[in-house]
Amino acid sequence: MNDNGHIFEVKASPRVLEEVGCDPAWRGMGAARVHQPKTHCMMDTTNKDTIPAWSSPGSTRTAPSVAHQGGRDKCTTGATSPPKIRGRDNVAIATWNVRTLAQTRKLQELTHELEKYTWHVVGLCEVRWKNHGKHLTKEGHVLYYSGEIDKHTNGVGFLVNKNIKNSVLGCHPVSSRAISIRLRAAPFNITIVQAYAPTTDYDDDAVEAFYSQLQETIDKVDKKDILIIQGDWNAKVGKDALKDWKELCGPSCNVVSNERGLRLLEFASYNNAVLANTLGEHKASRRWTWHVPNGIHHNRIDYILVQNWFRLGIKRATTRTFPGADVGSDHDLVFVNFKLRLKTIKKPKNTRMKFNLDRLRDPNIAESFKATVGGKFAPLLTLEEDHSAETLTAQFNKVMIESANETLGNVCRKTQRWVTAEIMDMCDKRRELKKNKTTPTGATEYREINRMIRKSMNQAKEDWIGKQCTEIEEKLEKNNSRRAFQIVKDLTKPKQARVTTIQGKAGNCLTEEEDILKR
């Protein structure tokens, strides 16, 4: 210990200690300690605590210290210090076959269920929405979807978290079975392809056409991007495939593969991709992704494919199925987690103000507004100096805006949500009943509450429409035809989605926002 109260620790031979002038009492011990308050510095030139590195079987790397595992600062002393590795964000991407989003308020039920998880992008299968477009949810998330033109079948999409919606570079709807999205990230951008393969009801020609279309989409992806291909493949990859395809899949597989599973492995091999959610060893309930309606048989048919060169970034412990999530589907939510940093682009907000002009129908408020405007205009009329038209216009706008803010206020758009808290409570109860779905009694209770939720949703929607009709009659009686016709328009107008793609001059499809603006 020196005069400052520090304890030194240096592992060295007695001869070295003698050369540096160490106290003779310490020479026999061959070591001295240095402990500085709130600073953990360590040097060990003969450290043998090494473990095999992931990069190569023969190399080794230093085992992490206890202080480092606990999240505390760690520094090393010596001639050269190792480079600082900056922490990166955990990116959570998921895939889920929700069976349908075309039912009443099914999308709100989905967002309610995802509130319990940390997620960035969720790929969806069997969305069953017509055409393709972009939809903003009540929570601020963005849904990109692609479906059939004239019927509610198939359909795929992406639900992008509101925190990273500005990181989306573009979305390309391919068909009702494939859609791709590109995210701005560091050090590489991410391209995610969501796929929904044909079921066993389709013949092999339909399956080959699906894989051909999917391969054409992948070939257009930037080679520098991190490519993720996920979805419901309706294919079984079993442990019998580990012998010939061990570099593409892990031990968490089905028992036996089928022909569709071998076709999926061929597709993964061609694109140098690995089945990420089969790499980690998990218990059976965290491997299954699809459940037969009888509750007895379970299979894994939903997979997330990640390029092989990026497999070391996958967090295998949390790349699995999460059976606790439930939206009334026979498929489970599947997550893949890895370390990456997403770039968030700040876009200018819309500063347009819309005042509540309906308040001017009240005579008292109308007189108050006139008095406020007159009081603010009075100083302007007494000005003796000549002002330009631009200056007078700016002052006029300022006076009107300040008066409207003080008297009228902004329009408060109330979102008419017919989904009540009782319905959300039933959704939470259904999630708890899912745990006992494998038993006959549990399966009966699960089907019953699922039926009650659908019935309550439809009844709540009818009640809400009835209240809207009552409000229309009240507004017409009060000669407020403007508000009455606005309600009628909101109830009867067809659903129009925002188009996210445009055709370029060369006939190609433009998906990224920058390219669309340049055109």
Image: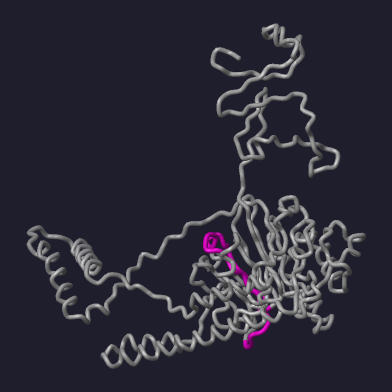
Residue at far front of view: 441
Query: For this rendering, which residue is in front, 8 or 203?
Result: 8
Residue 477 vertical position relative to residue 249 in the rendered view, above or below? below
Q: Is residue 158 magenta-colored?
A: yes
Tally the numbered discs: 0
Q: Range of the magenta residues?
A: 150-176
x and y, in percent, of residue 424 in the image: 54, 74
Residue 65 occupies quadrant = top right
Q: Residue at x 51, y 56 (%)?
A: 345
Indicate how the structure is coloured in the image.
one colour
Residue 123 in view, yes or no? yes
Q: Residue at x 67, y 9 (%)?
A: 22
Residue 273 in view, yes or no? no
Residue 505 occupies quadrant = bottom right
Query: For this rendering, which residue is in front, 42 or 409?
Result: 42
x and y, in percent, of residue 194 in the image: 68, 69
